[in-house]
Amino acid sequence: MSLIRRRRDRAHARLILFSILLALLLAAALFARSLCPLDPNVQDLSIVRQAPSAAHWLGTDRFGRDVFSRVLAGSTVSIYAALALTAVTAVTGTAIGLLCGWLGGWLDTVLMRLSDLFLAFPTLVFALAVAGVLGGGIHNAVIALAAISWPKFARLARSLTIAQREAPYLMAARLAGCSPAGLLLRHVLPNILGQILVAAVLDLSTMMMELAGLSFLGLGVKPPMAEWGSMIDDGRSLLQTAPWMVLAPVGAVFLTVTVFSLFGDALRDVMDPRRQTS
């Protein structure tokens, strides 16, 4: 028992640590414009492509804009767009999965075959096609990725709902006169919500990378708005002469994805007791 307790304590300590790091990251992204030492959109052609210095910690870009300020300003779009995208896909997919797992029948067959169709397409290729039709912009990029990303949550929610459908506590709730909607919302959903939440947190990193990929290909944010994917695209032709233009946003993506992934792993360890006993 002492070994299990030590593992549980370590898991909780890791979750607290990465929760603090994630909170700091989200706060920095939320107040990024206030934290920027310089205006991220102001151009100064007299200082184009300057190397990192005391005046410009991460150097300047091809238009003389402060790269550090643009990385900070871009965190708001890059992080919160990924959070919005994950929330939309998780809520939509979970709702579909709940209905399919609970009701079954023709609705389950049609929606699951539709999800199979979406899963057959490479995510980024499908999103490129949708974003190309809708046009550029971060909102259209979120819509394009949401259109292809919901099946993973629908599949997970459906399998969890089917596993819960014949549980003894649900039979007792039925005998107590609970309505089908009450069974689904008051009993089934709270019992599967933890696993859905863990899956959503772990998927945040993927969503952020895909949004950055669309921006890198020119279908994300529109200039002069700062976003990490578009900043990488803007500096890739100058990688040999001004590498800081690429390395700064790449480092920001790497740091953010790492924090989200480690937080998701810690959350999974805490919410799944079986992992603490293995």
Image (cartoon, grey):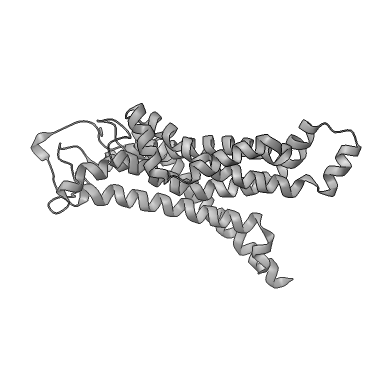
Q: Nearer the viewer, residue 68 or 145?
A: 145
Q: How many marks on residues?
A: 0
Q: Residue at x 44, y 48 (%)?
A: 206
Q: Quadrant of the C terminus?
A: bottom right
Q: Quadrant of the N terminus?
A: bottom right
| Residue 55, horizontal then vertical, whole percent | 19, 44
Residue 79 drawn above or below residue 243: above
| Residue 157 left/right relative to 71 | right
Q: Nearer the viewer, residue 108 or 24?
A: 108
Report if residue 122 is visible in the image.
yes
| Residue 143 left/right relative to 272 | left
Report if residue 58 is visible in the image.
no
Residue 144 location, quadrant: top left
Q: Residue at x 82, y 31 (%)?
A: 179
| Residue 216, horizontal then vertical, whole percent | 29, 42
Q: Residue at x 63, y 49 (%)?
A: 195
Q: Nearer the viewer, residue 35 or 50?
A: 50
Residue 152 location, quadrant: top right
Q: Residue furthest top?
A: 134
Residue 130 location, quadrant: top left
| Residue 39, horizontal then vertical, whole percent | 25, 32
Q: Residue at x 32, y 52 (%)?
A: 251
| Residue 261, horizontal then vertical, whole percent | 48, 54
Residue 133 drawn above or below residue 233: above
